[in-house]
Image (cartoon, helix red, strand yellow):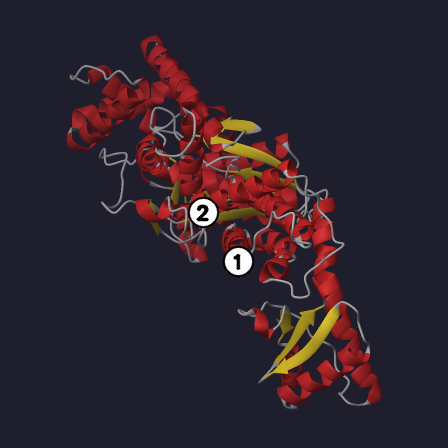
Amino acid sequence: MEEDFLRKVIRSSILSLQKKGELDEFEIPEISLEHPKEYIHGDTSTPISASIAKITGKEPFEIAQKISKEIKSHNISSIRESTVAKPIFNNFYFSKDFFIDNIKGILKNKNFGKNQNLKNKKVIIEYTDPNVLKEFHIGHLMSNSIGESLSRIFEFNGAKIRRANYQGDVGLHVAKAIWGKKNMTPPPVSDKIKDWGLAYQFGSKMYEEDEQVKKEINEINKKVYDRSDSEINVLYDSGKKISLEYFGKIYKQLGTKFDKLFFESEIYEIGKKIVEDGSKKEIFEKGEKGAIIFKGEKYGLHTRVFVNSEGLPTYEAKELALAKVKYDKYKYDQSVIITGNEINEYFKVLLSVMSQIFPDLEKKTKHIGHGMMRLPEGKMSSRTGKVVTFEYLLNKVEELVKEKIKNRDLSETEKIEITEKVAIGALKYSILKQSIGSDIIYDFDKSISFEGDSGPYLQYSLTRALSVLNKAKSERIKQSFKNIPDQLSNLEKIMHRFPEVVEKAGKEYEPHFIVLYLTELAREFNNYYAKNKIVDKTDEFSPYKVALTEAFSIIMKNGLWLLGINSLEKM
């Protein structure tokens, strides 16, 4: 049953009660629906009587009873039973035919859960955003996992999506890395990107400790911008090429294909001009040594530099340019930007400036700040060398997965593929399983469990279902609804909720709703599998059980895809 249909039923019952004089005349408030924690309390419920009680001054339980009685009088075939739970809830139990029709609908529609709520909406999502000449760390993994999942969720809600990646290829970090590359005394390591990472660490350290080095790095920074030094240009071009090839391999591993790569070097001049033009309109002010600043205190924010004393635009100015360049490239209805939450306050300043320079674009822009991932050892910093790289984390998780599957009947090729996909699934699940703004302390053992709340648990549940379907095919048991058990399981009852979970995840920008749902769904399927022999030629209900298993596999495949987690035939 569609939620909208049930809302119409409730609304029409309230109108009927008003017409009969059993309820006062009032404008009917929004009718919210929710699922009781336990199925014995109904398939869905509404606290509408509490809202009506506030308006009329009547007892909510009495109102709920009247609504329930009125709904029962209409004999709606989809609603098996309507009850009242004290003090305010109307609980609804759907009919057996409703759940069976839903299973049939899933089997006919392999895109079950997809909707057109965002049809014709153009959304550009910017995420990952690594800096060249530095290694890809777990902060980038966080942004990538969240951004890719949200992109897929919006697509499933009917939006036209463009995936964007904004990469820092100019700026002080680049100058530090180049100075480090030119002045490092230890021999370079064999891994080229690690070599650049070490160069950046060395340059950062010396920048803080030596005033002469600081001057040299600031000079290099200017030369990187204006490309006036051929030796620096060669180093820079080589390093950038190595970085982009390195990032490209990781994006492929993570299942992301960007529609557009934006670079700071391409937009910094636009940003500088926007700020200079804004200065004429008194949006900005002159700061120390000729810098151009925005006095955020006037707006309850803080002051930020937009063009520094060297005449170079800062990250803030470039972001202003990026908003315009994105819109010129792709006339979006919404721009979603995903970053670490350590720059949440900075983004408030940026949006305040945008509201004065590009008011229409500011209204279309949504910033999402995600929490930090930490290992038990603590926080990371690429500047000090305590960075936790994506490769380090992936390799460590892969080692645990290899140990877990070493005795399984799999070829070496299969083990290699499964190891990587299970490890990445474990990482993504750990990132997406809670609200985006929350910090994560990564738990290695829990993340790879085949029996708990984890990515591998979801993957294994689907693999189990696919194995059952293959067995049914080999024994020539075809799906059928001719014979259906008198008593349905909780598995049928949870499956119809998937479309509303997809809708909620899209509206609230929260993939964790899908994670929670899939984990509950997998648990119900595994309970069902433990209690029922699904493939059994002597069982008249076996064809129905096979149909139910396929319906589960369709939802699980779609759900895993929305999370950016691979489905596996074998595990």
Residue most toward the right?
19
Where is 5 relative to 399, above or below? below
Task: Give the percent coordinates (x, y) of residue 453.
Answer: 42, 52
| 190 to the left or right of 369 | left
Where is 91 relative to 289, above or below? below
Q: Nearer the viewer, mark 2 or mark 1?
A: 1
Q: Judge whether residue 4 can be spotted in this image.
A: no
| 532 to the left or right of 349 | right
| 415 to the left or right of 95 | left
Q: Residues within 10 Å of mark 2 (few under 14, many from 20)?
A: many
Q: Nearer the viewer, residue 350 or 459?
A: 459
Q: Amino acid at mark 1?
A: Lys
Which of the labelled discs sits on residue 101, or is there none? none
Task: Give the percent coordinates (x, y) of residue 534.
Answer: 59, 50
Q: Nearer the viewer, residue 447 or 441?
A: 447
Q: Tag 2, which secondary structure?
A: helix
Dot 2 and dot 1 residues touching (CB under 8 Å): no
Residue hosting label 2: 457
| 172 to the left or right of 508 | left
Q: Judge whether residue 381 can be spotted in this image.
A: yes
In the rendered image, the quadrant that contains the N terminus is: bottom right
- Tell me the quarter of the picture where residue 386 sits: top left
Residue most toward the front?
538
Task: Give the percent coordinates (x, y) of residue 149.
Answer: 53, 42
Q: Residues within 10 Å of mark 1 (few under 14, many from 20)?
A: few
Residue hosting label 1: 531
Q: Nearer the viewer, residue 128 or 420?
A: 420
**Which residue does the image show at 33% across and 25% down from the upper left?**
174
Task: Give the percent coordinates (x, y) of residue 537.
Answer: 65, 47
Q: CA distance from mark 2 to mark 1?
A: 19 Å
Dot 2 or dot 1, earlier in sequence = 2
